[in-house]
Amino acid sequence: MKKGLAIAFIALILAGLTALTGVAIDTAYEAQYLDVTVMSDVHFVSQKTFTADNYAYYEGEDKMEHISEAIFNSVADEVIASAPDYLLISGDLTERGDRLSHEELAKVLKRIEAAGVNVFVINGNHDLPTNYSQLDKKIDFNEYKEIYADFGYNEAVSTFYGGLSYSADLGKTHRLIAVDNIGWCYYDTQGEIVHKPPMGESQKQWIEEQIERCKTDKRIPVIMSHIPFKDHFPKSVANMRDNDAYLTMAKYFADNGVNYAFTGHLHLQDIKKVTSDSGNEFYDIGNPSMIHYPCSYSSARLSKNGVDISEVRHDSVDEKYLCDVTPDHVREELKQGLQNYAVKHMRQEIVSAVEKLDTPSGLLGGMISKGGDRAEALKTVAKAAKITCSSPIYVKDEKDGEISMERVMKTYGVDIPSIEYKTVYEASTVYAASVFSGDDALEGKPEFDLIKYVFYYLMYNLNAASEEFAAINPSVPINVDMEKLVTTGKLECYDSGIVPFVLSLLGDGTWERMIKGMLGNDFEGLKKAENIIAVFANGAFAGITDYFTGKEIDVDGLIYDGVFVRYAPELKSREYGRTVRLTFGK
């Protein structure tokens, strides 16, 4: 009797919970949920590669290759402790695709599986040869399947014969469809180079068959791939970068019961929604890199009607995993936390990019290598950019001979916002970190208000080099009206010599002649070509000429209304928070 009363009481509680929450509770409740850890872009480099002589080279790379193995081993400990049902890794398992790094990574994956966490992986563009020059440096697809046999291929219910895609069951309710959407190449049996396309027709057909099979088997499909099916960069960039084949696939997913995919490649923490012509929705869930800020991964709970996603920021590197040649300064800095270390490393990356502007490997290196007056002019531009980024922001931080941004702006009666950083290099790290991590918007913060003054300061430094420019090309003097720029936010582009100078750097090709004809006298030619530009840019910059009037640019409007409101709203308000719930169906 007591047992019967207890059962009735429990049933009453469950019924009440059902009424309150609207959630159907049944005996299979636990089976409806899967706890999954999702990460991407491990970029593993075996520490067996390092020596005392070459360590500094790896430390200086843009990704934190020098501690990639130590990071992943530390993350493995974290995953094992959290004990999810599955670990999914969406590509770029290694940085250089060498066999040693692949094999050493696989050892760590085996350690994770030995602890009871099932691991599934898919390849990225760093893992296999993507062009003929890499054929003898990276493993081929057969070696890949051999090394990662225990992490997807042995458990597969289906594999795609023309690539590395496979499908495998996740628990009793879901099925992973791991899509190899990378183009790679290999030697065939005759020694000829064969190129596998990123998304060939036969692979699309295989994917469609797997989705249909999920319906037959009453399985919920979960897509994992390296390349996103929707670009995660701000719309002004993404609209030009989106691959039609991937977008078409995303809309197919939406119309055929596939609600989301876990992707990587872009190192951005973000979620993008794709809506099909029929109004159905598909979410591309992007994950950042483990060896680039913010060094985070996702903890996801998969259910029949949705997915709950929480960000996990990894912040520790166990010293026991560092190699013997790791310098003391790296060990000491890592004691302050991986997040702090990653931010400092990102700052070094930004500094390096600017400082190398005029070197052979820099952004302007190709044009400078051709020599002549154009090369000398570009070197002067690079010099002005370096001064802008490296000089102190505030008077209090000036050293002998330095002129701070604050001092310059004060001469025009302007007080610049106060931030904790000393140089533009440091402040720019905040902007970059916001983009990669999906953190809160910059708007309303002092760093946001400072952006226009950085541009003004660059113009000031270009003005300061006017004699150098005149020596290179006397017919195009640089003379920016700084008073007008600072007080009104408007840049005189023709009278200042800025546009004529830029046009003088162009060659005589078809595109160059077209640009010269369009911008020869004022911005009216640009306005007339706006519709053509909008079509060419896939609508990304429609309305941009609102900020170009006559011979001047509304700099403030272009930065704050154009870039941060019209063109790149994701930088203002990202769709990915610390925790997000995606719900599908009823």
Image: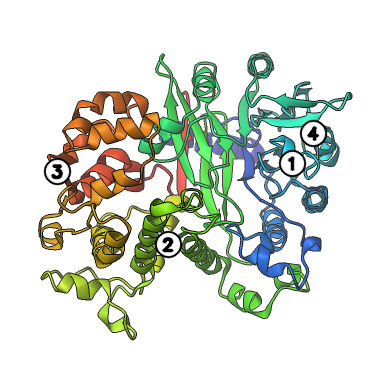
Secondary structure under tag 2 reads helix
Number of the label disc, if any, that sits on residue 141: 4
Compute the Cα span from label 2 to label 4.
38 Å
Compute the Cα span from label 4 to label 1.
13 Å
Mark toward the viewer: 3 or 1? 3
Residue 2, x across and y down, in percent: 64, 41
Q: Residues within 10 Å of mark 3 (few under 14, many from 20)?
A: some
| Image color mode | rainbow
Residue drawn at the location 20% of the way across and 35% of the way down: 545
Residue receiving disc 2: 429
Q: Earlier in the sequence, mark 4 or mark 1?
A: 1
Residue 297, x across and y down, in percent: 58, 50
- Which amino acid lies under the numbered mark 4 shown in the image of this protein? Phe
Note whether residue 439 is visible.
no
Secondary structure under tag 3 reads loop
Q: Earlier in the sequence, mark 3 or mark 4?
A: 4
Compute the Cα span from label 2 to label 1.
33 Å
Residue receiving disc 1: 134
Left or right of 477 in this view: 579: right
Give whichever of 461, 406 is nearer the camera: 461
Compute the Cα span from label 3 to label 2.
33 Å
- Which amino acid lies under the numbered mark 3 shown in the image of this protein? Lys
Residue receiving disc 3: 551
Compute the Cα span from label 3 to label 1.
49 Å
Q: Earlier in the sequence, mark 2 or mark 4?
A: 4
> For residue 325, what is the image quadrant?
bottom right
Mark toward the viewer: 4 or 1? 1
